[in-house]
Image (tube, helix red, strand yellow):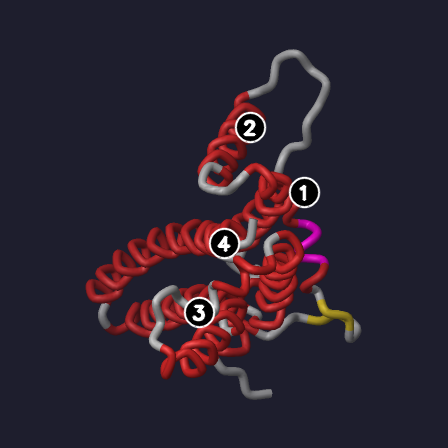
């Protein structure tokens, strides 16, 4: 069977059953659970500080009715962070490199924000489709453009996350293969390439964190427009 560098992004299967669901479920086991102790350990304290800090940043610009989304958004960012970081380990699979999974997360949440706005403030939500002071001849064109930009939001969310993670994994794969090929013939060049690989790995750690935060931040901005 011929393999390519893109085969690493195929969903692995055992006995015909996809392992993506298992990878998503097991990632939640990395985070410590809350207990009834008076004093927490350092890991639990760091977890509580991280959750409270991110929640404040996300919820600060949103009106009070939108604060009920805090649990959903924090659960989502923790899920994405864990999956993205675990996917950088050797011999692991990253579900967030699959466009189908990212779209399955983006479309329902984006649709929920739109429906929330249409239910609570219909006039204001529909008003976003037509900027104030638009000349009459441009009204039909602008409504079409704004509608397309609204409908393309979930696609942009999913494609952004997929493309950034896929590009990083491909670069790591290519540079790792180059190091192995150069090692017998050019050891010094192989060592220099290893330094590049190390720097790229650090960059991918930052990308994994930033993309998870950007995904949830954009959802919070969409929510801010509709509450």
Residue occupying the point 62% across, 63% down: 111
Earlier residue among tags 1 and 2? 1
Q: Which labelled disc corresponds to residue 225?
A: 4
Q: Which labelled disc corresponds to residue 206?
A: none
Task: Answer whether residue 86 is visible to the viewer in this image.
Answer: no
Q: Is residue 69 above or below residue 203?
A: above
Q: Which labelled disc corresponds to residue 48?
A: 2
- The mark tally for this picture is 4
Cα–Cα span, label 2 and label 3: 42 Å
The residue that mark 3 highlights is: 130
Q: Is residue 181 above or below residue 52?
A: below
Cα–Cα span, label 1 and label 3: 46 Å
Residue situated in front as seen by the camera: 183 or 223: 223
Residue 76: image location, x then y, percent: 59, 49
Q: Is residue 127 above or below residue 141?
A: above
Q: Nearer the viewer, mark 1 or mark 4?
A: 4
Cα–Cα span, label 1 and label 4: 34 Å
Q: Nearer the viewer, mark 2 or mark 4?
A: 4
The residue that mark 1 highlights is: 29
Q: Quadrant of residue 190?
A: bottom left
Earlier residue among tags 2 and 4? 2
The span shown in magenta is 22-26
């Amino acid at each position: 069977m011929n393999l390519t560098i893109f085969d690493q992004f195929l969903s692995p299967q055992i006995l015909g059953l996809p392992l993506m669901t298992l990878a998503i479920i097991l990632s939640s086991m990395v985070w410590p659970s809350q207990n009834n102790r008076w004093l927490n350990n350092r890991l639990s304290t760091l977890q509580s500080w991280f959750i409270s800090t991110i929640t404040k940043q996300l919820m600060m610009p949103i009106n009070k009715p939108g604060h009920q989304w805090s649990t959903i958004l924090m659960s989502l960012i923790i899920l994405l962070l864990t999956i993205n970081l675990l996917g950088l380990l050797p011999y692991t699979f990253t579900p967030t490199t699959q466009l189908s999974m990212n779209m399955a997360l983006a479309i329902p949440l984006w649709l929920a924000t739109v429906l929330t706005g249409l239910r609570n403030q219909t006039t204001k939500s529909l008003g976003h489709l037509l900027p104030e002071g638009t000349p009459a001849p441009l009204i039909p064109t602008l409504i079409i453009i704004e509608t397309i930009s609204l409908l393309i939001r979930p696609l942009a969310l999913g494609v952004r996350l997929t493309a950034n993670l896929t590009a990083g994994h491909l670069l790591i794969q290519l540079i790792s293969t180059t190091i192995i090929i150069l090692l017998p013939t050019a050891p010094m060049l192989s060592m220099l390439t290893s330094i590049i690989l190390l720097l790229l790995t650090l960059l991918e750690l930052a990308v994994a964190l930033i993309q998870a935060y950007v995904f949830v931040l954009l959802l919070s901005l969409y929510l801010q427009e509709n509450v």
